[in-house]
Structures are given as structure tokens and as C-alpha cells.
Image (cartoon, rainbow, N blue to C red):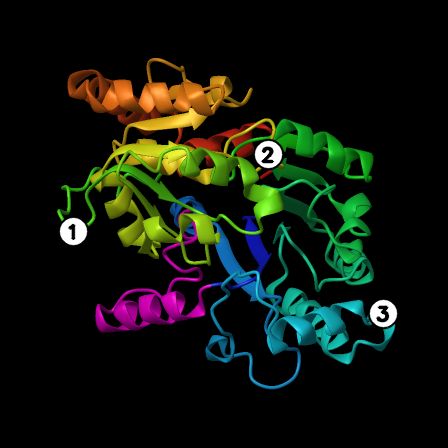
Amino acid sequence: MSHRILFIASLHHPQTLQNDRAKAVKNNQALPLFPGSSAFRFWEKAMRKRDYTVDVFWRNLPGYGSQDISRLKPEKYSNRITPRKIAQALMHRLPYEVNLDLRKRNENLLEKAREFQPTHLWMVGDNRAIHADTLAQIKDEIGCKLIYSTGTSPIVFSHAIERQCAPLFDVVITNDFYHGIQWQELGAKDMICLPGVAIDPDFHYPRAVNPDLAVDVGFVGTLLPENLYSERVEALSALSEFGTGIWTVHDVPDSLKPFLRGSALGESMLEVLSSSKISVNVHGNFMRYGGNMRLFEAAGVGAFQIVDNRPGIQEWFTPGEHLIVFEDVQDLQEKVAYYLAHENERQAIADAAYEHVLKHHTYDNRMDQLENAGIL
């Protein structure tokens, strides 16, 4: 029986996907399931190359009414209290048994699974909508495996509805080994420490420097809430004298607003990375093992990056050869100053990183690892 993968995910950038689908129609191409800014666009591509049948269920679409993604609004994190935040918080506090919208979303998923008949349900992390009873019924009726992929700690981020599902997970795919252990402690049957992101050589490749985006030190990512990203904020604050530019789709702390250059997703994000002499990559406070998506994407465009030292980095890269690691703010400042003054060394490291990810960290490599491990 061929693989049939039904992803269960949340769509955070609906306008991007709508634009991508409009382009696909114009070019007489197949409609993509995921926006170009999402790693799952490349998982989808890698699976289709192996003749997998793939579909997606958007769990953050309201249960009632049209299932058109145009109903969704882009998500932007800020510290401000808004009516939308209040409404969402109140909805999520409702017990599942009386939350009519969530119950309808679960009914829609059950209907979708019965129609699609997946061999594997692949649920993406930060589940706030799908109930354990729904997943148990799908597994019982269809006999499929349940994969859970996440880049965050269940101690820090998970919701009660998410933790209740853990005993149903046949395997958790996580880029942070410590997170995988935590999911097993919650009842997951197995876990594999495997970065959920990689590179697609058709998309991740060096771009020419854009003069409008060129900076000495560049950062692309999330900086709020500060209690989860304080190490990033501290590191970037220490680089204020180095011509730092920050790109994010969310708000930033007041102290870093002078360095905000705009948002960057998909192609524009890769262009920013290619236009920065040094790409600073600091993991979230909750990721103690390491392996965030920027680690691979920056290498995939031939960017030189300085990364906070995490154990997992040495599993996937060789510090000093493919990238540079720093231990504290003073070390970071000294290394930024040194490598800004030594362009040839910087370029040699960036080139080595690019060759390394082309050989070891493509989505095809990830698929090989999952198939060899018997997960797919």
C-alpha cells in the first residue's frame, strides 16, 4: 500500500498561500498545500517525488461555515492586549465538551480522514484544537500511524489538549533531543531527534547581495515574548554598534525597534540572509539542545553565521568549519568584530557550510532517515 500522508496543521500565513496558489494557477501548475514560507512546502515536495499522496487539514479554520483559507487572518505576535486575543483566550478556556466550534473542527477532521484514508497522520506542533478522542477514533477506524512533529518544549508551550494526545503518538519528531524525552515522559511511544527543517536546493541557494538589505549583522526571527527569547534580545542588544538589522513578522521589544528593517518570509528572508555579512542565530530560551530552522536555511544560502553554542549543533555541523559558535555576549561581540575584519575567513566558512548542507541536510536526506527508521 502506498503512503498517504494527511497533515494536521495551522495556517499562519494564509495570504502567502493564496498568492502562491494564484501563481500556480497562472503557470498551470499544481496547487501547493503549504505557503512557500513553510518548511512543509518542501516536505510536501519531497514526498510527492516518492509518489506519496499528500493532503492537509487546517485545524485553525473555524469549524462552521466555509473551509476557505481566505477566512483566516495573518498571525502577528505583540505584547498588546487586543479584542482578538481576549476572544481567543476565552474560547480556549471553554471545556472541549461545550466548545461547539472545536467540536465541529474535530468532526470535520474525522470526516476528512474517512474520505482520505491516510496511512499516516502527521500532526504539526502547537495543537490547540484536535482532541485525543478524535485521534483515537481515527486510529481505531483507519489503522494509521500518528506522527507528531514539533520544535518546542512541551513543558514550556504545550496545552492540555495537546498533552492529552501524547499517549497516542506513535513517534514524535523533534529537533531538540531534550524535548523528545519530555514527550516520551508524557506518554509518546517513541521519538526521533531529527531537525524538522532542511534545505531544498531549488529554493535555498545563495542570492546576490541586495544593497537595500545589506547590513554587517543581520537577524531574522521572533523576539517576543521576551521571557522566551530574552537570550536573543540580549545578544542583539549587545551588537547595536555593529550596524545590525532585524527582520521579523512580529513586534519587537522597544529597545530593538531602532534596528527593525521590516518583515521577511520565504524568498525575502533568504535574500536578507544572503545580504548580511554575518547572520546571528540565537536559539529560543526553551531550546537547550538546539537545531532551529535558521541554522539550516542560513547555511543553505551560503550565509556566514555565528550561533549560540548548543549541544545539537555539533551533531549537524562542525564549529569552526561550517559556522562559528559563541559562549556569551562578550564572546559574541569579539567574534563579530573579528569576522567583520576577515572577509576571506568568513567566506571560506560560509562556502563550507553550503557544501555541507547540500550533502547532508536536504529534505530528501530527511526522508531517507525517516524511511530507514521505519517511521514512513
Looking at the image, which is closer to me, 106 or 72?
Answer: 72
Q: Tell me, yes or no, whether the two marked residues, 3 and 2, touch with CB atoms within 8 Å.
A: no
Looking at the image, which is closer to me, 33 or 292?
Answer: 292
Residue topped by disc 2:
287
Work out whether mark 3 precedes mark 2 in sequence or the reverse, and give the earlier one. 3
- Residue 343 visible in the snapshot: yes
Horizontal side of residue 298 vs 249, given as left or right: left
Give the residues drawn in magenta, as a range: 13-42
Count numbered badges in the picture: 3
User: Residue 5: x, y in percent?
Assistant: 56, 53
Tag shown at residue 334? none
Tag shown at residue 95? 3
Residue 184 in magenta? no
Residue at the spot 74% in from the left edge and 41% down from the top edge:
155
Q: Secondary structure at mark 3?
A: loop
Work out whether mark 1 precedes mark 3 in sequence or the reverse, and give the earlier one. 3
Give amino acid for label 3. Pro
Residue at the spot 32% in from the left edge and 31% down from the top edge:
299
User: Residue 114: x, y in percent?
Assistant: 68, 67
Q: Residues within 10 Å of mark 2 (few under 14, many from 20)?
A: many
User: Residue 92: x, y in percent?
Assistant: 75, 68
